[in-house]
Image: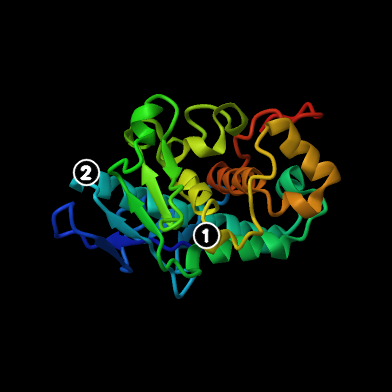
Amino acid sequence: MKLENALIAILASTASASPIFWKRDSINFTNSSSNTRLSPVTGEQTTYLNTWSNITFPEVKNCNVTQVKYINKYYQDMLEVLSVARSHLIEYNNDSVFKHWFGNGNPLTVLGVLDNIASGSKDGVLYRCDDIEGECASHLTTYPGYHRSDENATGETVLCDLFFTSKKPLEDMCVIGSLIEVGPKKFAGVDLFHRFLHIESINKGFVGEYTEEFEDVIEYSKSNSSYAVINTDSLLYYITEAYSVELTGDGCLGEYPGTNHTS
């Protein structure tokens, strides 16, 4: 299957106290020394091309050099997941992966959400690492990050130390456990996608966390598909499962409720 990929590099030559701006650049695919990769299913060489011609990036501020490197890597992971999931969606539409999370929902809605995250406006959107509201310190073992509550900083996301120490790169997918067992947000790139959906200028007051409980996510796919396609956690499970299927051929979802099938 032909897949497409878009990756980024960051321009970070200033001290962490100064804003750092993303620069769109062409770099090698994450898991290869060249811009090619063995197809997980057929073994054929696949070239990863830019999926979007106008990828947009947030500003990064008050993060040290190491944190910036992690953010850059994980932003690439996010783009990789979205690119592969988008390709899967276009080719297979409402396949079993889609039905797991969206039931009879509209694939075009999901496609629009993925495209908006990758290439929609990110004016005023900012990553920062300085725990400006003290929530990281107050929730050392539970908060990987938080969306700022200040009405003048609604586009800002704080990444806590726990984000950098607990989240995993895409290379760990299908290695550390099933997706149902570890959850999509265990993977840093997927978590960054999730955090964008907390920002009103990006979610448009349309996409939201209508339900986060796994059992309810499954129920949405069966009885509330119009909300499933705009429910944050449903989207997270879809992009992660689609990526895992492309990665391994079978995926690593785990046992889907109501079936005896484990993938």
Write down the quadrant of residue 219 in the picture.
top right
Name the one closer to the observer, 254 or 168. Answer: 168
Q: Nearer the viewer, mark 2 or mark 1?
A: 2
The residue located at (56%, 66%) in the rendering is 115
In this picture, residue 226 sits left or right of residue 6: right
Q: Position of residue 100 (x, y in %)?
A: 74, 43
Can you see residue 244? yes
The residue located at (20%, 46%) in the rendering is 64
Name the one closer to the observer, 29 or 237. Answer: 237
The residue located at (53%, 56%) in the rendering is 82
Residue assigned mark 1: 83
Amino acid type indicated by mark 1: Ser
Q: Position of residue 234 (x, y in %)?
A: 67, 45
The residue located at (30%, 54%) in the rendering is 33
Q: Position of residue 12 (x, y in %)?
A: 20, 59
Can you see residue 1? no
Write down the quadrant of residue 86 in the picture.
bottom right
Q: Earlier in the sequence, mark 2 or mark 1?
A: 2
Amino acid type indicated by mark 2: Thr
In this picture, residue 231 sits left or right of residue 151: right
Instruction: In the rendered structure, find residue 66 and report the number of the disc placed on it.
Output: 2
Q: Residue furthest right?
A: 223
